[in-house]
Amino acid sequence: MPNNPNNTDKVAKISALLYTGISLVAALLFLLLTYVTGKTYTPVARYGGATWVFILTMIITMPLVIPWVQKRYHLLMMRGHKQEEYPRKDKPPDACSPP
């Protein structure tokens, strides 16, 4: 990604993994709860409901997760650059570096 200084591709991939994972967990939890309750639901109700929960959770989590990941990623990148440019004062100097 040499032409992408902000690494938006990386942020997009991380975001997609997070909100898809959250949505899958929510849909599987819904499906699990339909079995645990003991009520008899039709397969259409179970799988349709799980699909509906997945889609709605994707819609809700996408605009929440993407800016959060962007903020965290940029903060981590800023910290990495600052540490390289300005070494910590409490860190002991290397044996080979002059005092």
Image: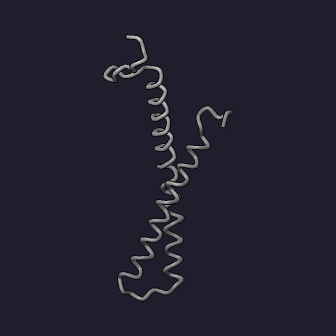
- Residue sitting at 39 percent across and 19 percent down? 95
Q: Is residue 88 left or right of residue 25?
A: left
Work out which residue is located at the far right of the displayed protein and give it: 3
User: Residue visible at 62% across and 43% down?
Assistant: 9
User: Where is residue 58 drawn, in percent x and y?
Assistant: 52, 59
Q: In the orientation shown, which residue stands out farthest toward the front?
A: 96
- For the image, the number of numbered tags is 0
Say above or below: 82 vs 29. Answer: above
User: Between residues 4 and 57, which one lies in front from this camera angle?
Assistant: 4
Q: Give the vertical position of 39 relative to 6 (above or below).
A: below
Colouring: one colour
- Screen quadrant of the C terminus: top left
| Residue with the most extreme left position | 90
Most foreground residue, 43 or 92: 92
Residue 7 or residue 41, whichever sits in front? 7
Q: Residue 31 appears at what percent x and percent y?
A: 45, 76
User: Which residue appears at 46% of the width and 44% of the height?
Assistant: 68
Tell which of 77 and 86 is nearer to you. 86
Could you say where residue 19 lies in the image, as x and y percent from the top left? 50, 56
* Location of residue 32 (image quadrant): bottom left
The quadrant of the rendering that contains the N terminus is: top right
Residue 41 locus on image (x, y percent): 45, 86
Answer above or below: position of 8 versus 80.
below
